[in-house]
Amino acid sequence: MNRIAFAISVALAVGVAHAQDKTIKIAGFGAKSGPVRSFGVNSEAALVAAADVINKGGGVKLADGSKAKIAIEFYDDRCNAEEGISVIRRIAGTDALVAVGPTCSNVAEPLFGILQKKVDDASDSGLQFPVFTDVAIKVGLAKISQWAFRNVPNEMTMYNSLFYWLRTQYPGLKTVYGGVEEDFAHSRATWYIVMKDRAAASGFEVVGNTKWLLADTNFATQVREMKKANADIVAISAHPFSACGALKEMARQGVKPKVLVGLTSSSSMETLQGCAKQAEGMIIPTSFAPINKQAVAAAKTTANFKGAADLHSMAAWENVFILKQVMESERISGKPGDVQADRRKIRDGLAKLKTTDGLIGVTKRDAEGEADKPYLFVQAKKGEWKVLHNPL
Amino acid sequence: MDFYFGLAQLIGVHTLLGLSAYIVLLTGQVSLAQAGFFAVGAYAAGMLTVLAGWHLVPALGASALCGGALACAVGFPALRVKGLMLVIATLAFGEGVRLFFFNFDYQIAKGELKVGPVGGEGFRQIRFFPENGWETWEVMLFIWVFVAGAMALLWWFDRSRYGAVLRAVGEDELAAQSVGINLTAVKVSAMTVGGAIAGVGGGLYAHYTTHIEHASFNILLATFAIAYPIVGGLRSVYGTLLAVIFVQGILVEGLRFMGDWRNLLFGALIVLAMNLRPSGILGKGRHA
């Protein structure tokens, strides 16, 4: 009798332990090495920090009423398309239910291409795995696949608003000149498709642009061209590494435009660490700033995990909370045998979303899987990003 | 298993790239133009399947022709120079091709969408495999048919008079010329075969990634192309395959869990491998 009681108690104990150990795996991936490694490092920190907050609150509620903890596993794709494809195939081979990433648009574009284009299209053998992008920001990528979703800001709206605001605030300014990091998908697309077009739409005359590459270290010629153009506004569509190089050269050659506009991705600590003095006054539209309690708390928690809070890493933070909400509303089972069914539920849940709660406000979502996030304008002032204007 | 099938696809494509450099290296020439031929093949096959609606097999045939013809055209002037001058000449060609595609726009309307290459934005939606319902293992087998074909061709060359001529030119040009070998014909033919193989590899690469852009065909890819046969050894065609497995399978994928340390180890392990096997993995041993 004692033996039976012992066996039952052991079985119960194992069962309880098993229930407590339920985990839902979310895979993160992005660049954790190379020139843009800071994006991957910050995203991973934000993912782990958000999961930690959720886990401390009990975890994710499953279909059977039990709760599961979120486990984050992060993979480095080195901002390389081939590696990104390998990574997503590797993730799809694990029990991860969804992936958050990648960092680079040149990875997102081929990666979305290997996903099934239309859900339930039996003739399309593409990978059926939900991807919820936090960083890769190049316009219009989510429409490549119905398994791809993004929580990245809409640069078209942001720069439209920024140039319109500049027009009303500084009616005396007439001309715009661009400095473009030409070999990076995001910065290139943002200048040619977004900034240039939106500036003209707001009545500015675009008098030209100069080009450089991500790995360039000498900007003398480009800045000389910029100086010659003598534009009222200079828009630098470049990531922090080369943007700082160009800004330092502008300071050296005495190029002082009346207004300096930056790329969304440059509204980060990297820019201030690299060239705070030269970036002084730069205005950038961003989808994150610590303007309320929850945004401050998210930034602090991420810092505890050795990550910096910016528009990209905080999108990763938001993604985890959105995924928790979707997993609970779609009643995923979290059982090992239901991995593919749960992935499908998450995809369908993400597709249903019309709005989501973000750190600085409500994000609207469209049918293509893109986000229209709230935004504000920040300005570099004495080594900090200060909120300059909140247009919403 | 899909991950391993996908990795095998990538190894297959890179093996073709390495083999394209292997045959040129046999003649003692170091060419950094292979990434250029690879790019031409990638864009040609992508445009034929996406814009013209061709099946992939004839599109790859066209890629081979484009790659081979361009290599032949480049070979005549480029192979008149030797050693470091040739490296610079072929590097310039590769960069020229990359910059051409950087500025190359050719889009047509297909339904509601406009498809085709758009300069720096790249060329997306090269989805022949998924759109035709090919499973990952089927794609892998398809790619490896071409790899096996290219390896068999080079293996046969190695055992033929032509192979002996290639190696003779590679060992000592002057001696080869003194016995009546036409150096230009040998070098240009090797370059042409290499260009055709790179063209096929590029065509498969475009359909593997579904999206190509100029940056995919940079100097790093050209360096990998010649590194594979050098690390693998020029003694046998299998050396290139082993080197690709070593680099892509072990150094890139196998060490992914090491995070930042992977990049450091990557270089260190190649240096170690070259020290232990200075003539390549399948080359002569250190004390041989």
Image: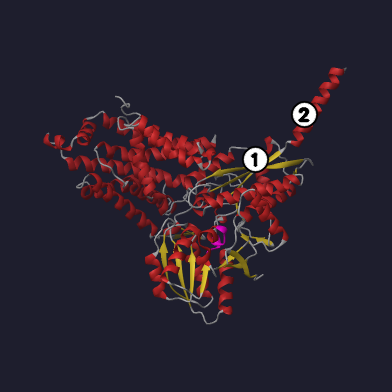
Task: Place residue B272 in its image quadrant.
Answer: top left
Subunit ID for the residue under disc 2: A
- Say whether residue A266 is magenta: yes
The circle drawn on residue A14 is 2
Q: Position of residue B30 (x, y in %)?
A: 28, 42
Q: Is residue A270 visible?
A: yes
- The quarter of the rendered structure image containing the C terminus of chain B is top left
**Residue B97, relative to residue B205: is it above or below?**
below
The residue at the far bottom in this view is: A172
* Residue linked to disc 1: A340
**Residue A156, relative to residue A126: is it above or below?**
below
Calculate the distance from the C-alpha at mark 1 to the C-alpha at mark 2. Answer: 27 Å
The circle drawn on residue A132 is none
| Dot placed on the residue nearer the N-terminal end, 1 or 2 | 2
Question: Left of A217 or right of it: where is A45?
Answer: right
Question: Left of A135 or right of it: where is A52?
Answer: right
Subunit ID for the residue under disc 1: A
**Residue B79, relative to residue B279: is it above or below?**
below
The magenta-colored residue range is A263-269
The answer to whether tags 1 and 2 share a subunit is yes
Front residue of A288/B57: it is A288
Q: Position of residue A239 (x, y in %)?
A: 50, 59
**Residue A143, relative to residue B221: is it above or below?**
below
Q: Amino acid at mark 2?
A: Val
Question: Left of A335 or right of it: where is A203?
Answer: left
- Say whether residue A51 is magenta: no
Disc number lying in front (1 or 2)? 2
Q: Position of residue B157 (x, y in %)?
A: 27, 32
SS class, disc 1: helix
Q: Is residue A357 visible?
A: no
Question: Left of B167 or right of it: where is B16?
Answer: right
